[in-house]
Image: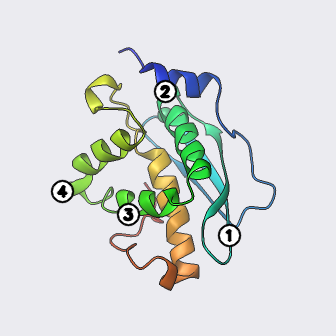
Amino acid sequence: MEIPTLLRQHFEDPYHRGTCEHPTHSAEKHCPESGCVISMDVLLDAATNACQEAWFDGQGCEVCEGIASMLVEDLERRPEALAEWAAAIEGLNDPPRSVSRRASLLRRLGLSDLDGLPQVPCIDLPFLVLGAIVQQAADDDPLAWPHFGGPSLGEEV
Ligand SMILES: [Zn+2]
């Protein structure tokens, strides 16, 4: 199946691929079915929890690496992005809601629907990594993340 152009561009010329020099939170996850690994580092402002830097790295396929690149770019460009993603990711691990959650997460990135994407098992991987980071941030500072609850995304994929 043809990979959407936007995703291919991010895979070939990724945004902030590498590691953050002084991350406040980091997470890595592995997809056993595809063998893909994605990690993310973020630097959150201690006072506001705004994302100042976001980086990804890993050994993934063009779908999960492309999504990870798009995600870290959005996190850096928009101060409110992290809180929005945190709310949107909640429920992704909860099977009754996960299909609609996945579609809405991909729509947020401008990937209009699942039909245009190869059905790879690691499609959720970048979102689950970001979910684990938000879970860490919420554990550190619960008052700052009042809407982040539900099944722990810190668990294994
Ligand atoms: Zn992958």
The amino acid on which the numbered mark 1 sits, given as a three-letter code, is: Asp
Could you say whether the residue bearing mark 4 is in a helix, strand or loop? helix
Disc 4/disc 2 C-alpha distance (Å): 27 Å
Residue at x 60% of width, y 65% of height: 50
Could you say whether the residue bearing mark 3 is in a helix, strand or loop? helix
**Disc on the earlier residue, 1 or 2:** 2
Disc sitting over residue 16 in the figure: none
* Res 3 visible: yes
Could you say whether the residue bearing mark 2 is in a helix, strand or loop? helix
Disc 1/disc 4 C-alpha distance (Å): 34 Å
> In front here: 87 or 40?
87
**Disc on the earlier residue, 4 or 2:** 2
Disc sitting over residue 87 in the figure: 3
Q: Which residue is mark 4?
A: 96
Q: Which residue is mark 2?
A: 7
The amino acid on which the numbered mark 2 sits, given as a three-letter code, is: Leu
**Disc on the earlier residue, 2 or 3:** 2
**Disc on the earlier residue, 3 or 1:** 1
**In the rendering, at what x and y percent does residue 32 appear?**
46, 43
**Disc on the earlier residue, 4 or 3:** 3
Could you say whether the residue bearing mark 1 is in a helix, strand or loop? loop
Q: Are marks 4 and 2 in contact (CB under 8 Å)?
A: no
Disc 3/disc 1 C-alpha distance (Å): 19 Å
From this view, report whether residue 116 is shown above or below residue 134: above
Residue at x 55% of width, y 52% of height: 78
Give the left or right position of residue 48, taking residue 43 as reference.
left
Q: Residues within 10 Å of mark 4 (few under 14, many from 20)?
A: few
**In the rendering, at what x and y percent does residue 55 appear?**
67, 48
Q: Which residue is mark 1?
A: 45
Q: Which one is closest to the eye, mark 4 or mark 2?
A: 2
